[in-house]
Image (cartoon, rainbow, N blue to C red):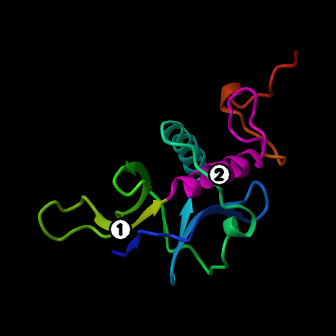
């Protein structure tokens, strides 16, 4: 796969989930005119994205009217276009845009030529969003992450109602205090 998604003026940038808590699929979605890209992301990537967007936005002028409600709802999709491996953020001062680059590294097909075994470059999406879109994305991402399973007080991993094998207890039950 070698798809490139360049969304220079997206009308929608959002993150959402599909499925019940504990089994949720996290997706990042962006639309620019007729182009819609849906990218599978991990919960930890969503949490990190929210944190870094928040830090970046604190250094910029305050955003104005944030998108909300239906503007942040996921559009229907059959399956994600690709799975995110790496996310990067930067700020384009000239365009006053926060640029999110999402890369997929597909190591399933080794290259035949020089550099064999390094892997084939995968899909990539470049989303240039406004400060308002970035702020709304950060807020929504934080809400989604916090709406999940509560963390274990010992290890910080999510508690599973079916049982939790906490690595801090080495397979034993937690001590009673």
Q: Is residue 102 left or right of residue 155?
A: left
Residue closest to the far left? 114
CA neighbours of label 1 inside 10 A, class few (<14), some (14 to 19), many (20+):
some
Is there any visible trace of residue 26 in the rendered image? no
**In the rendered image, which residue does mark 1 sit on?**
122
From which residue to which does the magenta span run?
A: 130-159
Measuring from the top left, give residue 18's x and y in whole percent.
71, 67
Residue at screen point 34% across, 63% down: 107
Measuring from the top left, give residue 83's x and y in whole percent.
49, 65
Position of residue 20 relative to residue 53, above or below, is: below
Q: Is residue 62 left or right of residue 165?
A: left
Image quarter where the N terminus lies is bottom left
**In the rendered image, which residue does mark 2 sit on?**
141
Residue in the foreground of this view, choosing between 125 and 68? 68
Whichever of labels 2 and 1 marks the residue nearer the N terminus, that label is: 1
Camera-side mark, 2 or 1: 2
- Location of residue 126 (image quadrant): bottom left
Q: Is residue 39 left or right of residue 19?
A: left
Measuring from the top left, give residue 65's x and y in whole percent.
65, 56
Residue at screen point 82% across, 20% down: 175
């Amino acid at each position: 796969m070698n798809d490139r998604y360049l969304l220079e003026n997206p009308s929608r940038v959002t993150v959402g989930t599909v499925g019940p808590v504990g089994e949720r699929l996290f997706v990042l979605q962006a639309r620019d005119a007729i182009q819609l890209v849906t990218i599978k992301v991990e919960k930890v990537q969503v949490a990190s994205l929210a944190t870094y967007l928040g830090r970046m936005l604190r250094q910029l002028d305050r955003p104005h009217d944030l998108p909300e409600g239906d503007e942040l709802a996921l559009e229907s999709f059959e399956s994600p276009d690709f799975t995110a491996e790496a996310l990067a953020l930067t700020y384009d001062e000239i365009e006053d845009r926060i640029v999110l680059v999402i890369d997929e590294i597909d190591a399933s097909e080794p290259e035949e030529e020089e550099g064999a075994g390094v892997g084939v470059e995968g899909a990539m999406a470049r989303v240039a969003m406004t400060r308002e879109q970035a702020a709304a994305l950060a807020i929504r991402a934080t809400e989604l992450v916090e709406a999940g399973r509560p963390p274990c007080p010992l290890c910080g991993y999510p508690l599973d109602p079916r049982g939790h094998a906490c690595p801090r207890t080495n397979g034993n039950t937690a001590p009673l205090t």
